[in-house]
């Protein structure tokens, strides 16, 4: 019963986005730690592009006849399958702009870290608001 209250498409996407933001934080921290390591190539998390593609596919699929799965063992089709399989991926960025073959720009990484922190805080606040609504429903609005 409680799983149905907590688990919905929005919360699943927020959870995956929080996971991606945490992974991005680790990648940025690793990049910053290796800013002076010769030959180091920066890493970045690819998630936003995948999320946009999956959400666009889901929007297009809403105009089609929808299949519904009534059991967790059912095979999902189309956009539903894309959203459930959505996972962040760490990719290494090629190229270099320094003589030591390192491609980490400390200013860019610090800007990305600040942006990622804001995104993570917003997602955490969204999660907190969702649980506050559930708590209110349990208390019958009191």
Image: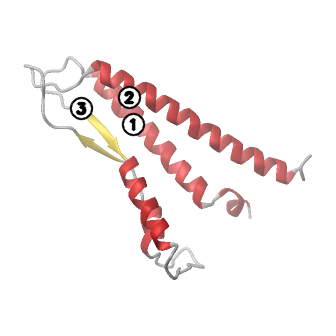
Q: Label 3 crowding class (10 Å Cα cut-off): few <14, some 14-19, many 20+?
A: many
Q: Which residue is mark 2?
A: 112
**SS at circle 2:** helix
Q: Position of residue 96 (x, y in %)?
A: 12, 29
125 w.r.t. 29: above or below:
below
Which label lies toward us, 3 or 2?
A: 2
The picture quadrant where one finds residue 34 is top left
Q: Position of residue 55 (x, y in %)?
A: 46, 60
For residue 33, which numbered disc appears in the image? none
Residue at 36%, 50% (x, y): give it: 49
- Relative horizontal placement of residue 69, taking residue 28 as reference (left or right): right
Task: Tell me if I can see residue 112 in this picture.
Answer: yes
For residue 42, which numbered disc appears in the image? 3
Q: Position of residue 90 (x, y in %)?
A: 31, 43
Q: Label 1 crowding class (10 Å Cα cut-off): few <14, some 14-19, many 20+?
A: many
Q: CA distance from mark 3 to mark 1?
A: 12 Å
Q: Which residue is mark 1?
A: 24
In this picture the colour scheme is: secondary structure
Residue at 50%, 35% (x, y): give it: 119
Between 18 and 71, the one nearer to me in the picture: 18
**SS at circle 1:** helix
68 w.r.t. 7: above or below:
below
**SS at circle 3:** loop
Q: CA distance from mark 2 to mark 1?
A: 9 Å
């Amino acid at each position: 019963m409680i799983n149905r209250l907590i688990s919905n498409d929005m919360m699943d996407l927020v959870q995956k986005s929080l996971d991606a933001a945490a992974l991005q934080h680790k990648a940025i921290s690793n990049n910053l730690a290796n800013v002076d390591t010769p030959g180091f190539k920066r890493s970045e998390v690819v998630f936003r592009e995948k999320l946009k593609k999956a959400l666009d596919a889901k929007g297009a699929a809403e105009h089609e006849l929808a299949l519904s799965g009534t059991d967790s063992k059912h095979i999902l089709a189309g956009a539903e399958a894309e959203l459930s399989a959505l996972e962040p991926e760490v990719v290494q960025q090629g190229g270099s702009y320094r003589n030591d073959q390192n491609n980490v720009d400390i200013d860019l990484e610090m800007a990305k870290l600040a942006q990622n922190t804001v995104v993570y805080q917003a997602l955490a606040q969204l999660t907190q608001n969702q649980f506050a609504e559930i708590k209110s429903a349990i208390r019958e609005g009191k």
